[in-house]
């Protein structure tokens, strides 16, 4: 895959961290080398990987301020098979200090250069705001994955985020593109959820992931154990949904590679249901 994906949404509580941690674990389970970067001062992705955010020698803060190389701050996730660049509340102070520095918006992109080719996928968990930390993530990223709940206010937040992406494309990162929109905490019994989902598909087409993340107790409680859902309850609906999302990302890449070579992609098994043989 070889790309950097920012998991971002300016609205909080939409499942960004849950998506970042569980997608990292799911991609790692497919034998891909994965790096997860926690750029949120809350440090929830760090804690969700079983790492104590209060006891870090180096973190995202030192990397952004240039006090250490990115490789020196990386930590392995024992139950997960991927690597984490941890973050904590020190990022709040780091953001203030960065304001006075030259090239403040490209700090993360420059820090990633020495290790970028060592990983198949680099996921960046962004804070729920358009600040300097989010800007660094979007400048460093190739694509943006947007988790969102299917509700009215989420649509407004999505509109604001798309405007932000366009501004960044026009200024500092012209190659930035939308990876996809992921429907999270989805309840098919809710009429509004279904209506918003239909609007998303109408406006964004195949940029909306076919995989839908359901509301799931096991998914919600896994962070309290410092594990991704697949290591907390591998048969839970939430764990299976993120494995399906990883599979969809990989399949999209394979289809794009085949299209570029002029070959027809293999049919998706989901599209063959009910077909006559």
Image (spheres, rainbow, N blue to C red):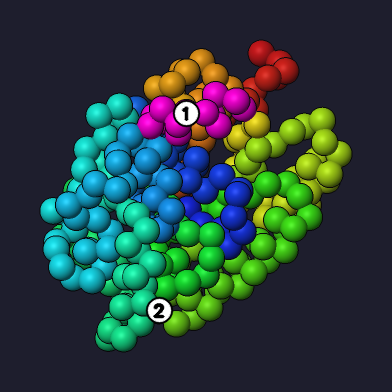
The percent position of residue 238, horizontal first and vertical second, equals 56, 27
- Asked whether residue 70 is in view, the answer is yes
Of residue 49 and residue 193, the one placed in the foreground of this image is: 49
Q: Where does the image place residue 208, in percent across and percent down from the top left?
A: 63, 47
Q: On screen, 177 above or below 5?
A: below
Q: Residue at x 61, y 35 (%)?
A: 213
Q: How far apart are marks 1 and 2 (CA)?
A: 37 Å
Q: Nearer the viewer, residue 208 or 64?
A: 64
Residue at image position (53%, 60%) is 128
What's the mark number on residue 222?
1
Residue at 61% of width from left, 48% of height from top? 14
x, y (%) of residue 169?
Answer: 48, 75
Q: Quadrant of residue 126?
A: bottom left
Question: Which residue is labeled 2 in the image?
Answer: 172
> Badge 2, how many Cα within 10 Å: few under 14, some, many 20+?
some
Nearer the observer, disc 1 or disc 2?
1
Is residue 250 positioned above or below 36 on the image?
A: above
Which numbered tag is attached to residue 83?
Answer: none
Q: Is residue 103 above or below residue 65?
A: below
Assign the magenta stretch its main secondary structure: helix
Give the SS element for disc 1. Answer: helix
**Looking at the figure, which quarter contains the C terminus?**
top right
Q: Please tell me which residue is depicted at 45% across the width and 31% down the height of the picture.
A: 224
Pointer 1: residues within 10 angstroms few (<14), some, or many (20+)?
Answer: many
The tag earlier along the polypeptide, 1 or 2, is: 2
Query: Is 117 included in the stretch rendered in magenta?
Result: no
**Residue 247 visible in this rendered orientation of the protein:** no
Magenta-tinted stretch: 216-228
Horizontally, residue 269 falls left or right of residue 188, namely left
Magenta highlight on residue 225: yes
């Amino acid at each position: 895959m070889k790309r950097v994906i920012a998991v971002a949404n300016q609205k909080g509580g939409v499942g960004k961290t849950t998506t970042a941690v569980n997608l990292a674990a799911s991609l790692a389970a497919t034998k891909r080398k994965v790096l997860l970067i926690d750029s949120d001062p809350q440090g929830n992705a760090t804690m969700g990987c079983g790492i104590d955010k209060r006891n870090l020698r180096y973190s995202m803060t030192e990397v952004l301020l240039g006090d250490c190389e990115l490789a020196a701050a990386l930590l392995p996730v024992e139950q997960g098979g991927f690597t984490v660049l941890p973050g904590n509340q020190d990022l709040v102070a780091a953001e203030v200090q960065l304001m006075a520095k030259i090239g403040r918006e490209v700090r993360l992109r420059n820090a990633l250069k020495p290790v970028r080719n060592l990983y198949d996928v680099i996921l960046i968990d962004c804070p729920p705001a358009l600040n300097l930390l989010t800007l660094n993530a979007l400048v460093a990223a190739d694509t943006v994955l947007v988790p969102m709940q299917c509700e009215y206010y989420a649509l407004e937040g999505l509109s604001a985020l798309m405007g932000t992406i366009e501004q960044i494309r026009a200024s500092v990162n012209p190659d930035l593109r939308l990876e996809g929109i992921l429907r999270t905490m989805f309840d098919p019994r809710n009429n509004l959820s279904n209506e918003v989902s239909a609007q998303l598909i109408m406006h964004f087409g195949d940029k909306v992931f076919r995989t839908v993340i359901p509301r799931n107790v096991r998914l919600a409680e896994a962070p309290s154990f410092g594990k991704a859902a697949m290591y907390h309850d591998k048969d839970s609906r939430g764990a299976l949904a993120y494995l399906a999302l990883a599979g969809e990302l990989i399949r999209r890449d394979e289809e794009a590679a085949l299209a570029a070579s002029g070959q027809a992609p293999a049919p998706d098994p989901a599209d063959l249901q009910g077909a006559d043989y």
